[in-house]
Image (cartoon, helix red, strand yellow):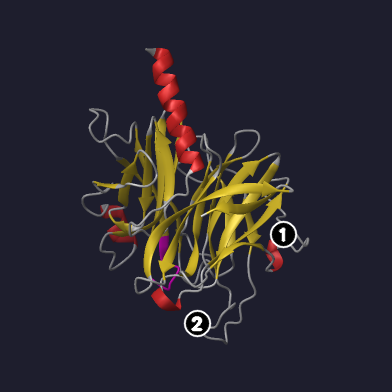
Amino acid sequence: MKISLLVVLAFLVGNISAQPIRTNISVHDPVMIRQDSVYYIFCTGFGINVWSSRDLTEWKREPPVFSRPPQWAANAVPGFKGSVWAPDISYHHGRFYLYYAISAFGKNTSCIGLALNKTLDNRSPDYKWEDVGMVIQSVPGRDMWNAIDPNLAMDETGTPWLAFGSFWDGIKLVRLNDRLDSVARPEQWYTIARRPRDPALADSLAGNGAIEAPFIFRKNGWYYLFVSFDYCCRGEKSTYKMMVGRSEKIQGPYLDRAGTPMLQGGGSLVMEGDKNWYGVGHNAVVSDPGGDLLIFHGYDAHDKGRSKLRIGRLTWNNEWPAVATY
């Protein structure tokens, strides 16, 4: 029986890795994790949208993480109605850690929160999201950074770091405590990527400081920092594209292929929009038995620019990421 089960699992993994991945669900800012044989997508939406799949192609909508907005979030961001942005999911200390962002659109009135769960299977008696509350907050007039788009990353010693940021002074990195629920003391803050921004110009002008959605992925001794340049959330006018740099240390400096620091606007192109997708971005990377997967959203040129889930397969050419199949 065990041999038969292994054969079946091997067939499924091989079949998944051999076939192009086709998806057609509406998502924004997706991240993915696998528990047992089920993949789970978490993404922006009321209470945080959740989807599940066994084959990366057919997806089932699951209950949202929050049935009602956390009260602390409503207090921290006036006018917050429950749309939670850009979650980040990982597994540590026997529990799933889900970071998420709340914000006033276009302002850095923003917070990053944290919720915990023992399992992602909502049929389990252990299934229950515990909201820990606020981890980081940005305040207009006080902070030149924006507390959204969180991503938890561990360095080679197992020390936890949280990357985050959008526009403003760029992408930030801060060390967390061992519980992963607040900034460590003494505080260690870094800016790891930014783009030049002219405050005299309109934000709608391409290249005017548009950088966000950090995701740090460690592979072969390198830390790869993925970010998104240009503009999301504009349907047919979206110009999102994914960029990357790498560093031998999680704190940086991150350089692109040409050696340009990401602190000076550098970044090597991973993927950009085309005739089928107006823009693609806000990515995550997942290690899977069939190879590394690039998870992101794109604005469908054949469906009025609606945002949809996309999954690509990564190869590492000369230790730089490239999308092999999409």
Residue 311 higher or lower than 210, as above or below:
above
Where residue 100 sits in the image (x, y, percent)? 40, 52
Where residue 212 sits in the image (x, y, percent)? 53, 63
Q: Nearer the viewer, residue 34 or 128?
A: 34
> Extreme right residue here?
259
Crowd class of label 1 (few under 14; some 14 to 19; many from 20; radius 10 Å):
many
Which residues are drawn in magenta?
Answer: 103-110
Q: Is residue 197 visible?
A: yes
Where residue 203 sits in the image (x, y, percent)? 51, 81
Does residue 134 appear left or right of residue 263 in this picture? left
Q: Is residue 250 visible?
A: no
Q: Quadrant of residue 172?
A: bottom right
Q: Disc 2 residue type?
A: Ser
Seen at 57% across and 60% down, the residue is 227
Q: Overall secondary structure of the magenta stretch? A: loop
Q: Quadrant of residue 190?
A: bottom right
